[in-house]
Amino acid sequence: MIGPRPAGGRAVVLDLDEDAEPAQTAAAVRSLAKQLGVALLEVVPGAQTVLVVATGPAGLQQLLAALPRLPSAPTAAETTGVVVELPARYDGADLDHVARTTGLSVEQVVHRHSAVVYRSAFSGFAPGFAYLSGLDPVLRLPRRDTPRTAVPAGSLAVADGWTAVYPRRTPGGWHLLGTVDVPVFDLGVDPPALLGPGRRVRFVPTS
C-alpha cells in the first residue's frame, strides 16, 4: 500500500500497489476499524484506491496508526466461499474481433474468459456496474477506438484488465463478448447490486 493521502479532516485515500485487490483492502480496513472500535462512515474501493471516511479526526488518526497491521495478502475467507455463477451466451458483437486481435479461436476466447473465478473489485460508471478483476492477460485489450452510443443491458464485455456486465442500456466502449440474462442490478432486491465489491463470480457458457 502507498499513501495514505489526506482527503479532508476525517478522510484519507489509500493508494494501492498494482497487485492489490481494492475490495479486499476495503474489507480489511472495515475489520481493523471494528477491532479498534473506530466508527467509519464509508469505505469506498476504486480501481487502485480505497477512500476511508471516519466519523471524526480522532478515530481516523487511531486507524491510520494501525494501518501497518492490514494483511498484505487475502485471507482464506476472501479466497473461498460462495461463487455467483452467471449463465452467459457468448454471442457478442465483438467476439470475432477479440479472437482475431488476440490470435485465438472463438472457442479459446470463450474458454479463457469462462475458466476464471473473478472478483468484484469496485463499482462505478453506472449503478450495479461491477469491475471484475482476474481477466486472462491475453484478453486484456484497450477500449474500442469508437464507443457505442448504446450497449444493451446484460452485455458481457472486456476492456483493459477488467470484465463486466452492463446493468442497463448505456453508452460504452468495451468489447462485447456475450450476453447475461440474469439482472445484475434490481432496486426491488436488497442489496440491489448482485456483484457488490468482494463478490466472486464465474461465467458459465450456455448454448
Image (cartoon, grey):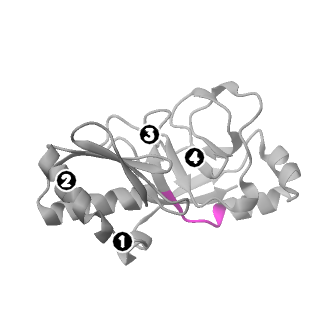
Q: Mark 3 is on which residue type?
A: Gly
Distance between mark 4 and mark 2 Cα atoms: 36 Å
> Where does label 3 land, which residue?
128
Label drawn at residue 71: 1
Q: Mark 1 Cα within 10 Å, few/some/many (few <14, many 20+)?
A: few
Nearest to N terminus: mark 2 or mark 3: 2
Instruction: Give me the residue at 39% from left, 62% from top.
Output: 24
Identify the image quadrant of the N terminus.
bottom left
Q: Mark 3 and mark 1 in contact (Cβ < 8 Å)?
A: no
Quick check: 83 left or right of 97?
A: left
Q: Mark 4 is on which residue type?
A: Ala
Q: Mark 4 Cα within 10 Å, few/some/many (few <14, many 20+)?
A: many
**Quadrant in the rendering for residue 105:** bottom right
> Where does label 4 land, which residue?
164
The local secondary structure at tag 3 comes to loop
Nearest to N terminus: mark 1 or mark 3: 1
Q: Mark 1 is on which residue type?
A: Pro
Judged by depth in the image, the label closer to the viewer, 4 or 1, is 1
Identify the image quadrant of the C terminus.
bottom right
**Quadrant in the rendering for residue 206:** bottom right
The local secondary structure at tag 2 comes to helix
